[in-house]
Image (tube, grey):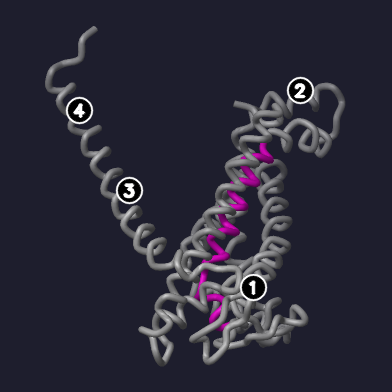
Amino acid sequence: MKKPKRLKITETLGFLTLRLCMACVAMILIVIFYDIITKGAGVISWDFLTKPPVDGMTKGGIFPAIVGTFFTTIITALLSVPLGMGCAIYLNEYAKDDGLTRFIRMSIRNLSGVPSIVYGLFGVALFVEACHFGTSILAAGSTLGLMTLPLTITASEEALKTVPRAYREGSLALGATKWQAIWTNVLPYAVPGMLTGTILGLSRAAGETAPILFTGAAFFLPDIPNSILSQFMALPYHLYIMSTQHHNIELVRPIAYGTALVLIVLIFSMNLMAIIIRYHLRKKGIAHG
């Protein structure tokens, strides 16, 4: 049966509009990446990646910022991944579908939209002051972990929802306990999606500036932190300082572009890791679909 001419024209215009929107977004991204790569690639060197900043950050490298970002991301993962996945399993598999559960889900989704600077202020009150962590890697990582938690819960719960109910019912019919059914028949199929959402959340946290601005990031700290209770330098905050707050912005602009390029490569690598993990698990037959 042929489509009416008017419907066909509307469909064509709709697809054309979507393609134009996609092309506009792609062009903007290409322009941004081209600007950062062309102006930052010349700064990248072994010394830039392995040396601390010197002379008021006008020379040297960004190694302390790389180390600080790495350890902060690790603490973020240790806090958000177990709690987020555990909460998602409970909400999807154990909690009753009542008003309280729906309210909790709505609250979690609302927390995903809270500005990061609010999490930074909350981190100061909770971790820096109440828990006496001080301005440190631990306080900053814990704050980023709280910020990432709603996204981890949501992504993990959506991955669990994609597993058919028959997988659970089949195990229960054979005499397995509820947890055995979840562990053997649900999680193996949901893990790829759960990991993908988690890594995407961590990559977002690695690029945040506002939460670490209040909880531990230092303006200039060429020494490597000796504990998780020490202040630290981080790539997002270092980029912010070099781009807006330095006393000689024109002099350090190449360093700012180099820092931006390293940060983009780091976040891109984490996103690529999520894609590779998902593909690898699906190829092995652990994930369905």
Q: Residue 271 at what x, y percent from top left?
A: 55, 50
Which quadrant would residue 128 be assigned to in this image? bottom right
- Depth check, mark 4 against mark 1: the one in front is 1
Where does label 2 land, which residue? 170
Q: Measure the C-alpha gap from mark 4 to mark 1.
A: 53 Å
- The magenta segment is 190-214
What residue is rendered at 40% in x and 78% in y? 253
The mark nearer the N terminus, 3 or 2, is: 3
Q: Measure the C-alpha gap from mark 3 to mark 2.
A: 46 Å
- Depth check, mark 1 against mark 2: the one in front is 1
Where does label 1 land, which residue? 50
Of 131 and 205, which appears nearest the observer? 205
In what element is the residue under mark 2? helix
Query: Can I make out residue 107 in this image?
Result: no
Query: Which disc, if any, is residue 12?
Result: 4
In what element is the residue under mark 4? helix
Q: Mark 4 near mark 1, Cβ–Cβ under 8 Å?
A: no
For residue 58, above or below residue 188: below
Q: Measure the C-alpha gap from mark 1 to mark 3.
A: 33 Å
Q: Is residue 254 left or right of residue 53?
A: left
- Depth check, mark 3 against mark 2: the one in front is 3
